[in-house]
Image (tube, helix red, strand yellow):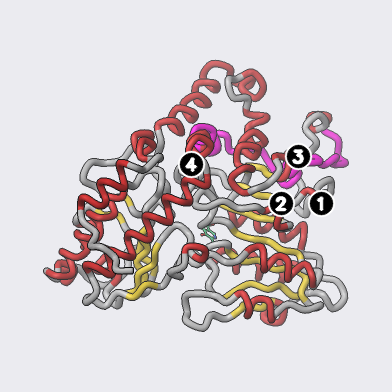
């Protein structure tokens, strides 16, 4: 099959036939600006703004009674958001709670599920995961009085960007207590086969956790069907909750009803919490993995934001997201074959997440040149440019424009005027 040339007409037609096209108006986007960084911090939607204002107004109107009497009572907000999040990850409503951050939730769930006993003491992770996850694993191993250099197995990567499921599975044996992997790798955008890894790990009696930072809101999951034991995520990336937005966790129902590793009064069964007893009666839902008072004003935007996901539907979001990243790669191939870019993400639809990952020795200066043209990319040291065309607010024509702006930068060497080094936040 010969691929026909992609033109502006081609992408305009894709936009006209896009069932999600209208959702762009739900978001605060800027004219003639291309936001390709929604996988680091999603944009504000009007509905998220409105739900935050509702909670502020409940505070203004009700004071302390906002906990139970407000339009969105604060006492039940974490559970309500948990229930709204559940369909995005194929979980049951009581398996999900809105709380903490990825790192805090990892500490909580490792404290709850990492129980080294006898010879079974090791943890499988990988060399490509985000540093915070690895720091949490190492500190939890140390808290058990063990040595991380002996207990933490970090599965190697052959190409430096992707992992092999076969290699992960080869590391499994009766000495491994727990496994923690990202669903989608934050640099290369590789999507791991969660179902296959989980099944293999369970055959070896290993507890399975996944970090969904780069997959929640980008693609559908079936955590309960797959039998994943626990998962964590943040909400400021694809779920558009805002800077520092409260994260979430999932615990498979077979583990519910236990005391959490790190208890606090919000771990309580709700009817018992204000009895103020010194013996905890844990909630029988994932709510038990909360600790202290929920961060209401950093959760409230999710009430509005998640409505958009329900209306758009995760399957449709995934379908458009794949079409956008495919278009991006096809345009790279068509317009920029000669400028030294290498694609680090897997090319197959079933193995990539929501962003594409381009390698280039001058990545830092190219990102600065893109910013100068009102394209917001994401640079990961030393040589990775991540571009995330978010299905809810990026059009096919936006992707077309971005790739032609990139071509213009490379052809005219516009990036040469910038230093090829990273800023303080990259
Ligand atoms: C974004 C991200 C984090 C950030 O953790 P926080 O505790 O939310 O700051 C951690 N791990 C991964 C894989 C991420 O992508």
- Mark 2, Cα crowd under 10 Å, few <14 / some 14-19 / many 20+, is many
Q: Residue at x 22, y 52 (%)?
A: 374
| Residue 264 visible to the viewer | no
Comes first in the chain, label 1 or label 3: 1
Q: Nearer the viewer, mark 1 or mark 3?
A: 1
Residue under label 4, please give it: 241
Residue under label 2, please give it: 224
User: What is the distance, in whole Å, between disc 1 and disc 4 at their CAs?
Assistant: 29 Å
User: What is the distance, in whole Å, between disc 4 and disc 2 at their CAs?
Assistant: 24 Å
Q: Which residues are magenta?
A: 276-305
| Residue 288 visible to the viewer | yes
Q: Which element type, helix, strand or loop, lies under badge 2?
A: helix
Q: Residue at x 61, y 74 (%)?
A: 165
| Left or right: 382 in relation to 219 | left
Front one among 125 and 136: 125
Where residue 170 sits in the image (x, y, percent)? 69, 81
Q: Residue at x 35, y 69 (%)?
A: 358
Residue 377 is a magenta residue: no
Relative vertical location of residue 221 with respect to residue 422 in this rendering, above or below: above
Is the Cβ of the residue at disc 1 closer than 8 Å to that at disc 2? no
Q: Which element type, helix, strand or loop, lies under badge 1?
A: helix
| Left or right: 423 in relation to 416 | right
Q: Which element type, helix, strand or loop, lies under badge 3?
A: helix
- Mark 1, Cα crowd under 10 Å, few <14 / some 14-19 / many 20+, is few
């Amino acid at each position: 099959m010969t691929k026909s040339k992609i033109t502006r007409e081609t992408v305009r037609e894709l936009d006209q036939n896009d069932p999600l096209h209208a959702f762009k108006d739900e978001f605060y986007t800027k004219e003639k600006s291309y936001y390709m960084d929604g996988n680091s911090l999603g944009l504000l939607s009007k509905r998220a703004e409105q739900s935050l204002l509702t909670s502020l107004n409940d505070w203004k109107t009700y004071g302390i009674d906002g906990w139970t009497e407000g339009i969105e009572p604060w006492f039940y907000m974490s559970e309500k958001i948990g229930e709204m999040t559940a369909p995005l990850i194929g979980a049951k409503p009581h398996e999900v709670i809105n709380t903490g951050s990825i790192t805090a939730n990892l500490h909580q769930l490792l404290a709850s599920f990492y129980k080294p006993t006898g010879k079974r003491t090791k943890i499988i992770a990988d060399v490509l995961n985000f540093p915070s996850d690895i720091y949490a694993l190492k500190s939890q191993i140390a808290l058990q009085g063990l040595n991380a250099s002996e207990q933490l197995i970090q599965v190697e990567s052959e190409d430096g960007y992707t992992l092999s499921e076969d290699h992960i599975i080869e590391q499994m044996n009766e000495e491994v207590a727990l496994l923690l992997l990202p669903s989608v790798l934050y640099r290369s955008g590789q999507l791991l086969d969660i179902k296959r890894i989980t099944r293999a790990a369970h055959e070896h009696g290993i507890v399975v956790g996944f970090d969904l930072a780069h997959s929640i809101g980008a693609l559908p999951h079936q955590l309960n069907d797959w039998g994943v034991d626990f998962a964590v995520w943040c909400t400021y990336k694809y779920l558009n909750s805002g800077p520092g937005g409260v994260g979430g966790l999932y615990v498979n129902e077979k583990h519910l009803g236990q005391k959490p590793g790190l208890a606090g009064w919000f771990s309580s069964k709700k009817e018992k919490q204000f009895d103020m007893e010194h013996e905890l009666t844990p909630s029988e839902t994932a709510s038990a993995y909360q600790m202290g008072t929920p961060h209401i004003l950093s959760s409230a935007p999710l009430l509005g934001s998640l409505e958009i996901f329900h209306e758009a539907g995760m399957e449709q979001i995934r379908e458009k997201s794949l079409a956008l990243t495919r278009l991006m790669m096809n345009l790279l191939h068509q317009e920029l074959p000669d400028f030294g870019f290498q694609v680090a993400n897997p090319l197959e639809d079933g193995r990539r997440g929501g962003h594409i990952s381009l390698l280039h020795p001058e990545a830092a200066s190219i990102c600065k040149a893109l910013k100068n043209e009102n394209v917001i990319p994401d640079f990961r040291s030393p040589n990775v440019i991540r571009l995330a065309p978010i299905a809810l607010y990026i059009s096919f024509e936006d992707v077309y424009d971005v790739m032609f702006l990139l071509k213009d930068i490379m052809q005219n060497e516009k990036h040469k005027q910038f230093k090829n080094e990273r800023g303080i936040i990259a």
